[in-house]
Image: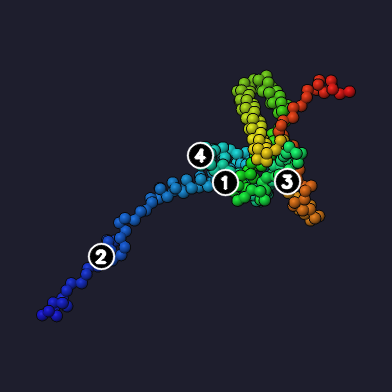
């Protein structure tokens, strides 16, 4: 009887088609995204990638009007995330490098020359990179147009405003005038930043070397052309470093022209 009863035990019923299965992993707590959410996230990722690429594309000239317009559209987002980097000093066409050289004169007349960035004096790498960025910034600021050149440009732009007014384009003239004022304010701000930065650099190294006077030079090191390299030009040729004096302490005050005529025999 026992054996017969065992043989008559009902078999486990198979699940209905489409119903829950037993023995497999539980799927009730699995997190899945709806198609709409996936599309939204994909669009956000694409916009983020476009914003990242827009900054170097709209960097220093040459840059198209379209790339600058796209970068301007993303500008608040790039500034908020500190993502507005150019990266144009890398490949495929790196430009010239820029350095800062300074000469300090001590009380005994001894003159020392130093240059940054320099792997011999600035290390580790992050410390070197900070000096590298300062040298690049100095080059940008000392490359501003001279006051005379800027005055000529403003005069020409104001002449355009007058011409627009005479032609009856008051709105365009007003917009052009606003652009002139914005450019003028930006130029004056950059001039102030340039003077403060150069003065800070000069004062710092003057105290650092305990010297009496200092001269600061902006150095430009252009890359040799392929033809120059084939002709034997060296990357570290001293003649390829072009420099100009941009600041000195104590500052040298230029005499007015009338005083020069008075002391000239």
Q: Which residue is at the far right?
A: 265
Dot 2 falls on a residue whose secondary structure is loop
Using residue 107 as the reference point, say whether residue 169 is left or right of it: left
The residue that disc 3 covers is 221
Residue at image mark 1: 53
Q: CA distance from mark 3 to mark 4?
A: 34 Å
Looking at the rendered image, the disc whose residue lies closer to the viewer, 1 or 3, is 3
Residue underneath mark 4: 80
Q: Is residue 123 left or right of residue 106?
A: left
Which residue is tagged 2? Answer: 15
Q: Position of residue 114 (x, y in %)?
A: 71, 44
Residue drawn at (18%, 72%), measured in percent from left and top?
10
* Mark 2 → mark 1, Cα distance in angstroms: 54 Å
Number of marks in picture:
4
Say whether marks 3 and 4 touch (CB < 8 Å).
Answer: no
What is the x, y in percent for residue 145? Answer: 71, 32
Q: Is 137 rendered above or below residue 260?
A: below
Q: CA distance from mark 3 to mark 2?
A: 79 Å
| Residue 89 percent coordinates (x, y) | 65, 47
The residue located at (34%, 56%) in the rendering is 30
Q: Is residue 176 visible?
A: no
Of the residues under marks 1 and 3, which one precedes in the sequence? 1
């Amino acid at each position: 009887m026992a054996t017969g009863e065992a043989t008559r035990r009902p078999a486990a019923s198979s699940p209905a088609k489409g119903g829950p299965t037993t023995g497999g992993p539980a799927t009730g707590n699995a997190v899945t995204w709806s198609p709409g959410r996936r599309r939204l996230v994909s669009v956000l990722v694409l916009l983020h990638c476009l914003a990242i690429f827009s900054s170097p594309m709209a960097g220093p000239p040459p840059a198209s009007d379209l790339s600058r317009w796209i970068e301007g559209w993303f500008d608040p987002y790039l500034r908020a995330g500190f993502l507005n980097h150019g990266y144009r000093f890398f490949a495929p066409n790196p430009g010239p490098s820029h350095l800062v050289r300074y000469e300090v004169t001590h009380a005994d007349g001894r003159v020392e020359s130093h240059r940054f960035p320099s792997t011999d004096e600035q290390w580790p790498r992050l410390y070197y990179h900070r000096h590298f960025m300062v040298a690049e910034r100095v080059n940008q600021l000392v490359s501003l147009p001279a006051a005379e050149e800027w005055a000529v440009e403003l005069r020409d732009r104001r002449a355009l405003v007058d011409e627009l007014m005479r032609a009856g384009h008051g709105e365009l003239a007003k917009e052009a005038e606003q652009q002139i004022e914005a450019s003028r304010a930006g130029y004056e701000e950059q001039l102030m930043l340039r003077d403060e930065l150069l003065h800070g650099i000069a004062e710092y190294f003057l105290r650092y070397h305990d010297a009496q006077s200092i001269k600061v030079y902006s150095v430009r090191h252009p890359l040799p052309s392929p033809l120059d390299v084939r002709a034997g030009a060296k990357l570290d040729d001293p003649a390829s470093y072009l420099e100009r004096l941009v600041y000195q302490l104590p500052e040298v005050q230029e005499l007015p022209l009338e005083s020069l005529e008075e002391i000239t025999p």
